[in-house]
Image (cartoon, grey):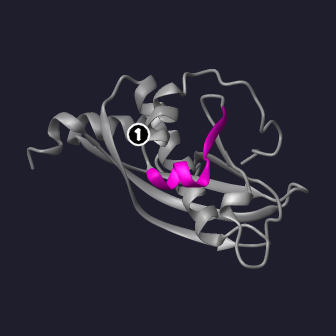
Amino acid sequence: MNAHASPSAEPLASTSSLESTLRKIPLTESMHVEVAAYDGRVLTLSAPLAPNVNDKGCAFGGSIASLLTLAGWGLILLKLEAAQLDCDIYVQDSTIRYLAPLWGDLRAHAEIASDGPHWDEFLAALAARGRARLHVNCLTPTESGADACTLVARFVAIVRSRANTG
């Protein structure tokens, strides 16, 4: 992921639905999560350090994990909306690695993993079965650009019209 190259890129796609959804989640309100950028490939969420600080003065690991998970989930939400698909999205599993303390504001970058199903395969599975899985890679950089934390997650999308039928 080359998320360090342009973390403040102007969004190419509308993020208003994601921003609206984030405002309805009490945790994201407490964390002060905001959409920082979205270019159709990478979603960047941000949150200030102050409401996400731990007893040592650096970012709380739970806040970092939450922001990374939200970035992966939000990326899929935005891409499905662009494809005009109405789905429920769930995190199925994830692996997180804390590599360095984060002493400043939090940023989480998410993009579809290159080593799992590609977007077109995901859409084909969604059309055929009404559900599909997708791997997303997420990272939080330090102030110097090194990785502070990485998350690899598998998300499941279920078409809403089929979600309640079995």
Pick the residue in front: 80 or 54. 54
| Residue 118 in view | no
Residue 137 located left or right of residue 99: left
In the figure, residue 77 lies in which quadrant?
top left
Specify start and end residues of the magenta stretch as a single range: 26-37
The spot of residue 56 in percent (x, y) is: 78, 78
Q: Is residue 161 left or right of residue 90?
A: left
Residue closest to the far bottom: 55
Residue 4 or 102: which is nearer the viewer?
102
Residue pictured at 49% horizontal, 40% vertical: 23
- Residue at point 72% right, 24% down? 10
Q: Say above or below: 4 vs 146.
A: above
Q: Is residue 35 magenta?
A: yes
Report if residue 40 lies within the magenta region. no
Across and down, in percent, residue 148 comes to 77, 65
Choose between 147 and 45: the one closer to the eye.
Answer: 45
Amino acid marked by disc 1: Glu
